[in-house]
Image (cartoon, grey):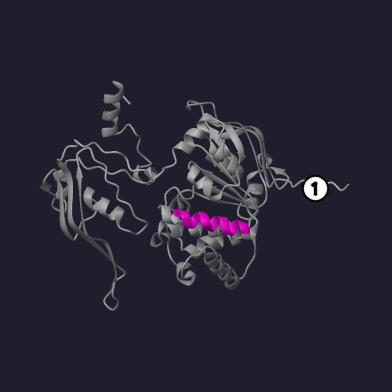
Amino acid sequence: MKMEKMELPVLDIQNLDIRLPRGADRELAVQGASLQLLQGQTLCVVGESGSGKSMIANAIMGLLPRPHVEPVAGKILFDGKDLLQLNEGQLRELRGRRMGMVFQEPMTALNPVMRIGEQIAEVFDAHVSLSAAEKRQRILAALADVGLPEPEVLIDSYPFRLSGGQRQRVMIACALVLEPALLICDEPTTALDVTTQAQILKLIRELQQRKGTAVLFITHDFGVVSEIADQVVVMQTGQVVEAGPAAAVLARPQHAYTRKLIAAIPNGQVRATAEDREIEHVLQVQDLRKTYVTGGSLFKKGRRVEAAKGLSFDVRRGETLGLVGESGSGKSTVGRCIVGLAPFDSGRILFKGRALQPGAQFRQQTQGKIQMGWIQPVDATPSIKEVSMGRPAGWMQRLTGRGA
C-alpha cells in the first residue's frame, strides 16, 4: 500500500517566546506560541491589542527592535530554515522575494516623497536585474493585478494623491510583485471603511487562490475571520488559547476569551434610547457646504470636489450620532469643519445655541469644548513629546492624585 506524502507547512512556529524590555507590563510578549500554515491556506491570528499577534509577524520578518524586544526561545521554520538563526543579510534576501508583508497603515509604510512606481521598483532592484522598460511593465501589471484604476497614471503619482483603499492596494502589489510563498497581513483593513475593507479582503482571497500563496492574517475582528480564514489561532496576553479550523472555532468556540471576541461582532441591532432624554441641542449643523478645488492653473480648470452639500443634523446632550459613509463621502471633512480645522464655505454650525464663525476665532469661541479623536493616534501625537507634558500631565495628576 502506497503511503500518502504529508504536505510540509510553509511556516512552522514552535514554542516561540518573545521577551519584552524591563519595566513592561509582562516579561514575555509571546509565550510558548506554536502554529502551522500550509500552502494556499489563510491562517488568522486573532486577539485584542497587546495579545502578541503583531510581535509574531515582526519576528517572522526579522523586524523586532533587538535587543530590546527579541525571541528568547523556540523556532520559526520557513523554507526549511530557522529564521531566528539567520543574520540580517540572509533575512533581507528572503524579504520581498520569498515572504512579503502588508502593514496596517500604508502611509507609514509608503515613502511620501517617492512616486508609487519608484517604491515598487525597489523590490525588483533588491532581488532581480531588469531593464527599465521591463521593470515598468511589471510594475504596471502588478498595479492592474490588484484592481487599481489607470495604472499608467498611478505609477507616477505620490501616495497622498491616493485614497486609503488605493494605498493599501499598492502595498499588496508591492508585497506580491515577486510572488512570495508567504504573505503576512498585519491588520490591513482596520483603518478602512467597510466597503473598502470588503474589497481588500476579496482581493487578498482572489490573489491567494490564483498564486497559491500562504497568508498569515493578523486581526482583532472575528467578522474578518469569518470572511477569509481557513484556520484560526486565538491569542490572549501572549499565549495561544485556542486553535483549529475556522468553521469549528466560529461555530463551537471552546475558550471563554474566544466566545467573548465572537460576541463582540456587531449584530446590526439598534441601541435602545431613553424616552426622557434631554432636548438641549449641543450641536446643530445647518446647510453646511464645503468644496475643495485642486490642480487649477491659468490654463487648466481645477478639480472640484463637493465634500459637503447642504448637510444638516442636530446632536442633543447625551446623544450619539453616527456619521457613516465610505472613503471620500465627506464625513471626515464635516468633522474637521465642526472642530474648526477646516473652513466651510457656507451654512451654520451652532454650539449650545451659539453660531460659530469660521476663521481664527472659531476655536476661541468653543474654548476647547469640541474635541476630535483621530483614526491614527501615531499621526496625531507628536513623537518627540512625552505624554506627561502640558495638559495631559494635569489630567494624570487629577486621576491619580500624584504627578504623571
Residue occupying the far bottom of the picture: 299
Residue 85 in the image: x percent, y percent? 68, 39
In the displayed structure, 99 sits above or below 352; it is below
How many residues crowd mark 1 within 10 Å: few (<14), some (14–19), many (20+)? few
Q: Is residue 48 visible?
A: no
Toward the viewer: 16 or 314?
314
Toward the viewer: 119 or 266?
266
Highlighted range, magenta: 197-209
Task: Please identify the quarter of the rendering in which residue 35 is found.
Answer: top right
- Residue at x 29%, y 33% (from the top left corner): 392
Q: Which residue is mark 1?
A: 5
Residue 177 colored magenta? no
In the picture, measured across the screen, residue 344 lies left or right of residue 177, that is left
The secondary element bearing badge 1 is classed as loop
- Residue at x 30%, y 50% (from the top left corner): 323
Toward the viewer: 387 or 78?
78
Residue 98 in the image: x percent, y percent? 65, 53
- Residue at x 29%, y 38% (from the top left corner): 272
Q: Main secondary structure of the magenta part?
A: helix
Q: Amino acid at mark 1?
A: Lys
Task: Please identify the quarter of the rendering in which residue 305 is found.
Answer: bottom left
Residue 64 in the image: x percent, y percent? 55, 40
Residue 361 in the image: x percent, y percent? 14, 49
